[in-house]
Amino acid sequence: MLVTSCIIVLLFPHEGRGEKYDYKVGAVWRGADLVAPFDYAVLKSAEEAKAEETLERSKAILYYVKNEEAPSGKMSLEVPADDELGVINEERKVVILDGNVGHEYRMGDFECFDEAAIAEGAVPEYVLDRNRTSLELESRLSQLSYTSELVMAGEKIVGKGEMVTEEKGRRIAALEAEEERRFSEGFSLWGRLGGQLLLAVIAFTALYMFLKNTRHRILEDNRKVLMVLVVVLLMSAMEAMMVWEAPEWVLLVPLCIVPILMRVFFDMRVALYIHLTTVIILANLVPNSFEFIFYQLVTGMMSIIAVRNLEKRSQFFVLALVIFASYSFIYTAGVLSQDTNFENLTGEKYLIFFLNAVLTLLAYPLIYVFEKLFGMTTALTLMELSSTNNKALRELSRRAPGTFQHSMQVANIVEDLVSDLGGDVLLAKVGALYHDIGKIRKPIYFTENQTSGFNPHDELDYEESARMITSHVTAGLELAREYGLPAEVQDFIRTHHGTTYTGYFYAKEKERHPDGNFDVTAFRYPGPRPYSRETAVVMIVDTVEAACRSLKEHTKEATDAMVDRLIDGKINEGQLDNCPLSYGDIAKIRKMLKTKMMSIYHVRVEYPKMKTEK
């Protein structure tokens, strides 16, 4: 986080103080009373200064000398074309120099030849003395004052709630200019960098404390931390580039990509905190900080809400529409609150918001990129994996149809249980679909796939049979990597039996060796035990569904006893010790499983045989 803070600060320009006062002529001053901190001069506007200069240029006397090449007595003048000399008319004063003596006339007293006439051969008797005329012009301009008024220290410039008139606007602008000048005189690059870096570190520290106290698992995974920092750094680089090239278009950068990506990979609270941290850091580095914060914070919150259940690609277009609408409504409301009419709305702003919303669609390919780069799994990937047309599930259905039906049944039950427990429903469902994928390798060794009456275990000893059964976990992990299943889904494969024993063959081997003199590890699954709510639920449902299917009588008593015995067995063996299921959760699972098993495997009424007439 410290390195990221340094990089972000170095990406942005550091010269200049930036705008300090957020105001607009004709709008209400929303800040506290603004009082002059020191004496300063308010300069005239550019138009006023130019008008005064033009007036003084027109008043300047034009000095002429005798043209030695022209005959005397013509009383003609060269008319200058220089705009610097102001307006040339008949009343313009001219002075004819004769040595050190000058005689004053009007321009209308002479015949005037312009550049075109001179080019055609006209020869004026008197030509402009440019050196003397320039001295006269400089003397007049040097006496001009570009200051309209002097504001004294302690004088109120504008009060809270007052309308910012043109006069007050000039006073505020002059104060900004004077403060910028004084700032430049004492500017320290190291001080600027140190302050900006400290603000960024403070923002990241707040984010770190939030994650440490509420989402510590994110901090424990370097991949997740790195992904967060890369996303923040990427969007900061885009903002920096815009500040360098076109600061007025800074809202063009699709900053809402940050909360969208964070919401897809994490939860709403994490997404909001990361977005808030990003906005706070960047607000200190971009112009119009208050406007930037308001736009990005509100629009970011709307995008987080809109992306809450992102499961289809078409939702990205709805998301882009929400972002465009949010920016547009904020801008329209802001203009109305300041200017009270629609005349000051500009189409350029709406164009910026539209382009921002379009660029936000880049979030969709970025999700895939970050999934692959950092080994993360999103709801979009899980939705694709949940389709039975997926290659792995099609192969399971073809080669081990009994296992496929069992997995589908387990997934349906798990989906309801995890939904009531408040877990990740989609992840649990996908994990249940793929938990027995390893049975593709040797499907005939598992009872649900034995349809011909042949049981290969009859030809093996108990240890070999146990090894064949437990091998479907390691085979499943190999196939998962081959099919490119995410690590989160692979966790269900390795944990769905925990460290339990292969019940039937282990019991048979104990009967043969009551002294326990045999290799116990051959009958035990490699584990590990479930460590999440979702993996624990899949383990329980997998065991209960398979056992209840094998019951000869599906009465309520038999089913309830079977569910209680299996769940108690998992608890007593310590298989649920590492998962966050509470006793209340387990009680809820018991109740729901009993109801589910009775509804799935209930005893059907036997229909009477109908006699048929010949």
Image (tube, helix red, strand yellow):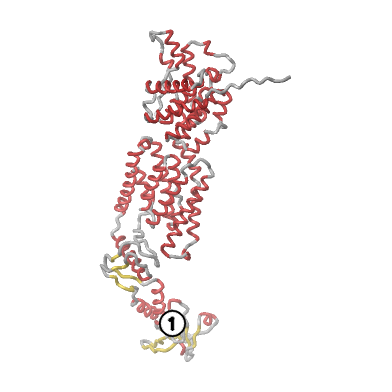
The residue pinned by badge 1 equals 128
At which x and y percent is residue 496?
45, 25
Q: Is residue 491 visible?
A: no
Q: Quadrant of the C terminus?
A: top right
At which x and y percent is residue 564?
42, 22
Q: Residue at x 33, y 68 (%)?
A: 171
Q: Residue at x 43, y 45 (%)?
A: 259
Q: Nearer the viewer, residue 155 or 534?
A: 534
Q: Is residue 259 visible?
A: yes
Q: Nearer the viewer, residue 378 or 282?
A: 378
Q: Nearer the viewer, residue 52 or 548?
A: 548
Q: Residue at x 43, y 65 (%)?
A: 340
Q: Secondary structure at mark 1?
A: strand
Q: Does 102 appear above or below 411?
A: below
At which x and y percent is residue 9?
36, 49
Label 1: few (<14), some (14–19) or many (≥20) C-alpha neighbours in 10 Å: many
The residue most toward the bottom is 73
Asked which quadrant contains residue 520, the reply is: top left
Q: Quadrant of the N terminus?
A: top left
Image position of 407 (left or right of 607): left
Q: Amino acid at mark 1?
A: Leu
Q: Nearer the viewer, residue 141 or 28?
A: 28
At which x and y percent is residue 38?
26, 66
Q: How many marks?
A: 1
